[in-house]
Amino acid sequence: MKKKIAELLKEGISVNSKLLDTQLEEIAKLADAMLQTIKSGHKILLFGNGGSATDSLHIAAELVGRFRKERKAIPAIALTENISTLTALANDYSFDYIFERQVEAFGNKGDMAIGISTSGTSKNVVAGIQKASDMGLKTAALTGETKTGLFKIADICVRVPSTNTARIQESHIAIGHIVCELIEDAF
């Protein structure tokens, strides 16, 4: 058991080391774009499926509440939080449209939409980012290493250099914590 634990921890360290070597600029762009969005009086919309849905909730909570410092609340909404809306949209339209419709409802020019997908190809996340782009929102994505789907349409795409879903998700929340800390430091 200890051998497996050590192997998994070392794999995570390796992925984050590669992330540092390859995505530092994109993470800085993401933090800066989020900061500029907030400073201009606009909001952040976050969304994803499964573990990425939870990541969007986690990041939004850190922004609305606080991460490490007391400060003014930051307007951030996880489009994964309203189960009634999600299931109504999935039932009435299709699961593929659950984020697109919410971006249309809640997004305004000047806001920022962040789609989270380990594969980068989740149809509903891609549709949400495409809608945000069409509406003039800034767009960003957190994905795995593949250059498909979200990579092609998001203004900023932080690609975790892995195909292992668990390691990608671990890096996504680390990235979320990093940008939250940078945003707080700016206030």
Image (cartoon, rainbow, N blue to C red):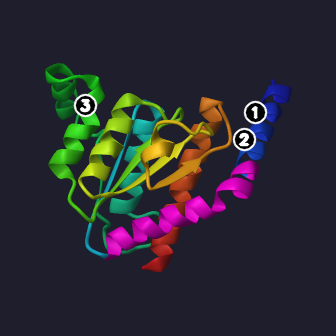
Mark 3 vs mark 2, CA separation in Å: 33 Å
Q: Position of residue 61 (x, y in %)?
A: 37, 54
Q: Nearer the viewer, residue 110 or 178?
A: 110
Alpha carbon separation for disc pair 3 and 1: 36 Å
Q: Is residue 164 visible?
A: yes
**Start and end of the magenta stretch?**
17-39
Asked whether 38 falls inside the magenta stretch, the response is yes
Image quadrant assignment for residue 124: top left
Please state, as top left, top right, bottom left or bottom right, where the N terminus lies in the image.
top right
Relative to 183, 41 lies left or right: left
Kind of residue at disc 3:
Tyr
Q: Position of residue 130 (x, y in %)?
A: 33, 44
Q: Position of residue 125 (x, y in %)?
A: 37, 37
> As rendered, which of 136 and 187 lies closer to the eye?
136
The residue that disc 3 covers is 97
Task: Identify whether 76 is placed above or below 165.
Answer: below
Question: Which one is closest to the eye, mark 3 or mark 2?
Answer: 3
SS of the residue at dot 2?
helix
Compare marks 3 and 2 and give the one earlier in the sequence: 2
- On the picture, is 4 further left or further right than 57? right
Q: Amino acid at mark 2?
A: Gly
- 81 is higher (above) or lower (below) than 185: above
Q: Secondary structure at mark 1?
A: helix
Residue tagged 2:
12
Residue drawn at x 26%, y 67% as measured from the top left:
42
In the picture of the structure, the residue carrying the numbered disc 1 is 8
Q: Is residue 48 above or below residue 74?
A: above
Residue at 42% x, 30% y is 122
Q: Does residue 68 appear in the picture of this structure? A: no
